[in-house]
Image (cartoon, helix red, strand yellow):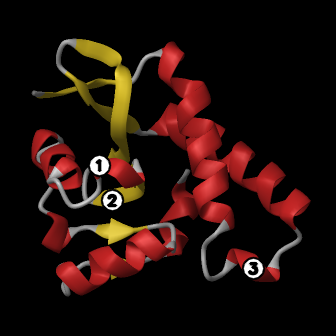
Amino acid sequence: MIAHRQATADDLPFIYSTWVRTSLASPLAKHVLPSTHQTAQRQLAERLLIASQVLVASLEDEPAVILGYLIYRPGVVHYAHVKKVFERRGILSGLLDAADLDIEECHLTHFTYDCLRLLKRWPRLRYNPYLLMEI
């Protein structure tokens, strides 16, 4: 069974590392020096983790086993990640439901390959990186 819980300090190393690694593979990041990207994304992640809610999907009987996470504010998804092995199993949908987000009314602030999949699945979803200026 899958549990949804608030992130803890123990989850942060995984969140930071996957955020930086997966954002580095984004279509836009290939035009940025990797060292610049990694430093900037780490700083941005630190700011967003303070200003946002972070929901983690984990195994119910092993909460340290993270399946995915969602970083969000009302109406805004800043970042979402699901481990490859758990993709297409409803992990992200479960996180969105647990966060009580109507994805069709949300904005995304990061553009990754996962974002492209979300935009195809939910066509009313919008990419708006300028919402990051509010943080």
Look at the picture and state if 114 lies above or below 43: below
Quadrant where the image shows the N terminus: top left
Look at the picture and state if 25 lies above or below 132: below
What separation in Å lies between label 1 and label 2 (alpha carbons)?
A: 23 Å
- Mark number for residue 30? 3
- Mark number for residue 53? none
- For the residue marked with disc 3, what is the amino acid? Lys
Look at the picture and state if 51 lies above or below 121: above
Instruction: Of the two numbered discs 1 and 3 on the same chain, state the one appearing first in sequence.
Output: 3
- Mark number for residue 76? 2
**Badge 1 is on which residue?**
86
What separation in Å lies between label 3 and label 2 (alpha carbons)?
A: 25 Å
Q: Nearer the viewer, residue 40 or 95?
A: 95
Q: Is residue 118 left or right of residue 111?
A: left
Say few, some or many: other residues with alpha carbon within 10 Å of mark 3 (under 14 / 14 to 19 / 20 or more): few
SS label for mark 2: strand
How far across and how far down the image is residue 101, in percent?
15, 53
